[in-house]
Image (spheres, helix red, strand yellow):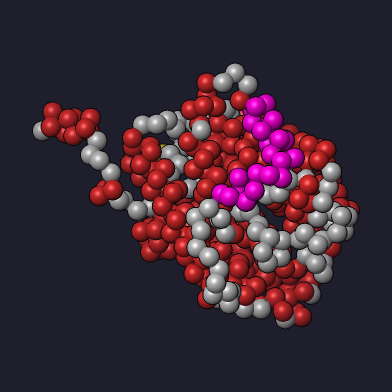
Amino acid sequence: MTHSLHPYGSHRSPLPEAAPAAAPASPPSAAPATAPSAAPAAAAGGKQRDAFFDNAKYLAIVFVAMGHCWEPLTDGSRTAEALYMFVYTFHMPAFILVSGYFSRSFDMRPDRLRRLITGVAVPYILFEVAYTLFKRTAGDDPDYPFSLLDPWFLTWFLVALFVWRLTTPLWKVIRWPVPVALAIAVLASVSPDIGDDLDLQRVLQFLPFFVLGLFLKPVHFQLVRRREVRILSVPVVAAALALAYWAAPRMTSAWFYHRDSAQELGAPWWAGVVMTLALLGCSLVLTACFFAWVPRRRMWFTVLGAGTLYGYLLHGFLAKGSRFWGWFDAGWVHEPYGEVAVTVVAAAVVTVLCTPPVRRVFRFAMEPKMEWAFKKDAARLARARHQG
């Protein structure tokens, strides 16, 4: 295949999150028993956060930002294209697995539904409007329509997370949840009539990772952090990089976005089945390699793991703005030293956007209280009266 389907410009790249504000804090049992030095930090409400998961979310969001800065470089650099494919194989599945893992306790309890609305639905609406205004002005497209049914760029993940979380109780009652989710993903990959509303293709094709995360236990993460797994991951990653370098001029990276059916990518329907299963296997292997090397103890960046939704949504303005404003038109950017420079800048920018000062400024949009929008919890009021 050619690169005619390359997502430069209108072909939206995925990206991530990591665990949004609506995700509950990691339970104390999730902390690896073999890593006493990884003392969890206190989170809001007195709950404890596992440093491992905050480290994983921060490192994943850095890979997201680097992938977005590599995108304009891929047409002229085989190395950039290979790195782009390699990163896109695992960073999205890693985010979704963690999101599923932290959705295990989700049910239809009123307080959890309120958090789902304020931590996922409201940020989606606000940022979809903000991104549309940004595209109209900075993108010189004044007629670009407002539409909550057509997520632009990064906001698709919030739609997907909202849908996945709402379906969590269903996955807990069926007998074979992961095979069923995988079957849905395969069927979606060969169904061009699904359309673009709410980026439903992505919602369905990435679904197996979320469902798998729902049924993971702390012991599974401990297994991939064993020393032998870390050692084995080195040749696996080297082989994956070599394969990506070979594949870069031979296939389109649009397969890694899971936003189109096989027919929409110009391939026969059976290619959707093959690619969905093949990419699922590759993604799981590389995600395990990624988790194997995530630090277990508290690091200087551990605190940033709680702010990855901020970095995810805010860095999108710069990721798209850099294209609108022609930052990649300069010749030096496409030289090896220029590619390294923009990679470092992207990592630094998203790091800053995850910091507590930035989170305080934008908390009104990411974690609004909105007490005025909800009915009073009768049970909570009764308890308060009883205690009073």
Q: Could you tell me which residue is drawn at 17 percent across and 30 percent down?
A: 382
Determine if the magenta segment contains residue 192: yes
- Considering every residue shown, the one lying at the far top of the view is 175
Residue 308 screen position, x and y as percent: 51, 53
Residue 370 screen position, x and y as percent: 30, 51
- Range covered by the magenta-colored residues: 178-202
**Image quadrant containing the N terminus:** bottom right
**Image quadrant containing the C terminus:** top left
| Viewer can see residue 378 | yes
Residue 25 screen position, x and y as percent: 43, 39
| Viewer can see residue 83 | no
Q: Is residue 330 left or right of residue 204?
A: right
- Considering every residue shown, the one lying at the far front of the view is 193
The majority secondary structure of the magenta stretch comes to: helix
Q: Nearer the viewer, residue 299 or 5?
A: 5
Q: Is residue 34 left or right of residue 66?
A: left
Determine if the magenta segment contains residue 299: no
Residue 360 screen position, x and y as percent: 37, 60
